[in-house]
Structure formats: C-alpha cells, structure tokens
Image (cartoon, rainbow, N blue to C red):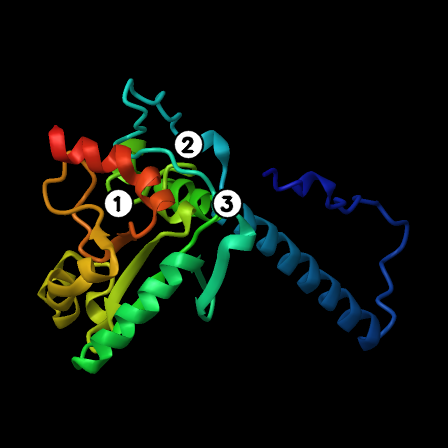
C-alpha cells in the first residue's frame, strides 16, 4: 500500500513584503493544532503501511504433488453453513461432530478433565490469514509455515469435523507439543476413539506435518470417513 504522502499539500514559500503578522495567541494556537493533526495523520499512514500485508512479499506456493498434497496437506471442501452449529462462543462444528464433541467433553468432565475447545471450523479467509501474513511476519518460507499451519483450501478445519483442544487446567500448554503431558491428552488417548475422534498429526506422521497432539478430527459418519480416507490411507501405507 502506498503511503500517498504526496497527497499532503506542501506549504508554499512566499517572500512577504512586510514582516508576518501572527494575529495574536488564538492564531498561534490554531496553527500549532493544525501541525499536530497533520503529524498524527502522517504517523498513522506510515504505521498502517508498516503492518499491512503485502502480497508481493509472499513466496509463491508450489503446485500440489501427484498425490494431491500441497506442502504435506490434502485439500478439503468448505463445510456448508447449514451443516454448522455453535458448540462454544465463536466456535462451530459440523452438527454430527458437534454432538460427538459435546458427549466427549461431558464424559471427560465426569472424570475430572476439562477439555477446552480452542479452534473448530475455519473458512478459507480465516485460514489464509493464519498462513500468509504470519509467514511474512516471521520471515518463513511456505515449506516452513506449512509445518504448523495448512495453506488455505488444505485445512481439516474447513470440513467442520476437526478441532483443536486444550486442557482448561493448564492453558500454558495450549497449542504446544507439551500438551501431550497434560491430563487432557492422556484422557483423549484412552477415550477419544469411543467418540470417533482420531489424532490427525501424530509424531513422525508420513504427511510431514509437525506433531500436533491438540488437533483431532471426527470420523463418525460415512461422509467424514470419505473426506479423510486419503489422509488415513496415506499415513497407514507410506
């Protein structure tokens, strides 16, 4: 984005025939106020440009491979709005996955474990903002960014069947590999399959995605099984 500072008028230098008359304190105060306002405007424009996302700074993504993966991730369709339900403030899941999650969350609570929903459905725009601007801010290459975040169009979160979980008693472990040391993760390892949830990216997964003990997907319907069949088969046979 251009600063467009050239649109700010430049004061013309005049050579008066007589010394300037300031007209008293009121005029001086008005002049100082005008200079202050213009200075703030310039600062805001420069500050906005500094933190704006510029597509020209983004390294181009490669083409998907023969197996359909882009930087390790398979492509997924965006869930239909009518299929999504809110399961927590600001978080939606596919209706089938929502029922499974709420039942699992209730069972965990009965065992003294509080599963905290951190992230659920994401549309393409949200995933884009998680991928490209953060990549530029951190000075990463696409391959590096894709280790921890899928490119837009390639996130399991698009389906409405995937979610990120934390331990409400240990928020410092949110979205960290050390989440595996929490009571919540230990509970999920033992019980998540009963509610049709599977860990998407275990350690040393064949997709080459970083270990995410907090990321789980629901596979309790034919539609969900079909969506994740390619990823499941790839990780099982490679």
Give the residue pinned by disc 3.
125
Q: Residue furthest top?
A: 66
Q: Which circle marks residue 58 in the picture?
A: 2
Q: Disc 2 on helix, strand or loop?
A: loop
**Residue 138 drawn above or below residue 94:** above
CA gap between label 3 and label 1 equals 17 Å
Corner quadrant of residue 121: bottom left
Residue 9 location (% of width, % of height): 76, 45
Q: Nearer the viewer, residue 162 or 55?
A: 162
**Residue 143 drawn above or below residue 217:** above
The mark that comes first in sequence, 3 or 2, is 2
Q: Nearer the viewer, residue 199 or 204?
A: 199
Left or right: 42 with respect to 58?
right
Q: Disc 3 on helix, strand or loop?
A: helix
Left or right: 217 with respect to 35?
left
Q: Residues within 10 Å of mark 1 (few under 14, many from 20)?
A: few
The residue lying at 19 percent from left, 66 percent from top is 173
Give the residue pinned by disc 1.
148
The residue lying at 30 percent from left, 43 percent from top is 225
């Amino acid at each position: 984005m251009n600063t467009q500072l050239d649109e700010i008028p430049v004061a013309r230098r005049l050579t008066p025939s007589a010394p300037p008359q300031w007209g008293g304190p009121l005029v001086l105060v008005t002049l100082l106020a005008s200079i202050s306002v213009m200075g703030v405007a310039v600062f805001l424009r420069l500050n906005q440009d500094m933190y704006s996302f510029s597509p020209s700074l983004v390294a181009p993504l490669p083409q998907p491979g023969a197996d359909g993966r882009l930087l390790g991730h398979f492509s997924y369709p965006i869930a239909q709005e009518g299929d999504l339900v809110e399961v927590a403030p600001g978080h939606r899941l596919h209706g089938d996955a929502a029922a499974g999650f709420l039942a699992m969350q209730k069972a965990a609570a009965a065992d003294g474990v509080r599963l905290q929903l951190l992230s659920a459905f994401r549309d393409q725009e949200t995933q884009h903002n998680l991928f490209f601007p953060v990549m530029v801010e951190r000075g990463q290459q696409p391959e590096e960014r894709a280790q921890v975040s899928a490119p837009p169009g390639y996130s399991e979160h698009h389906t409405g069947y995937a979610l990120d979980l934390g331990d409400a008693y240990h928020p410092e472990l949110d979205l960290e590999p050390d989440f595996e040391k929490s009571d919540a993760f230990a509970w999920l390892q033992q019980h998540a399959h009963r509610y049709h949830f599977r860990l998407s990216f275990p350690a040393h997964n064949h997709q080459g995605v970083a270990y995410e003990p907090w990321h789980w997907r629901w596979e309790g319907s034919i539609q969900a099984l079909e969506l994740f069949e390619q990823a499941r088969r790839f990780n099982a046979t490679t």
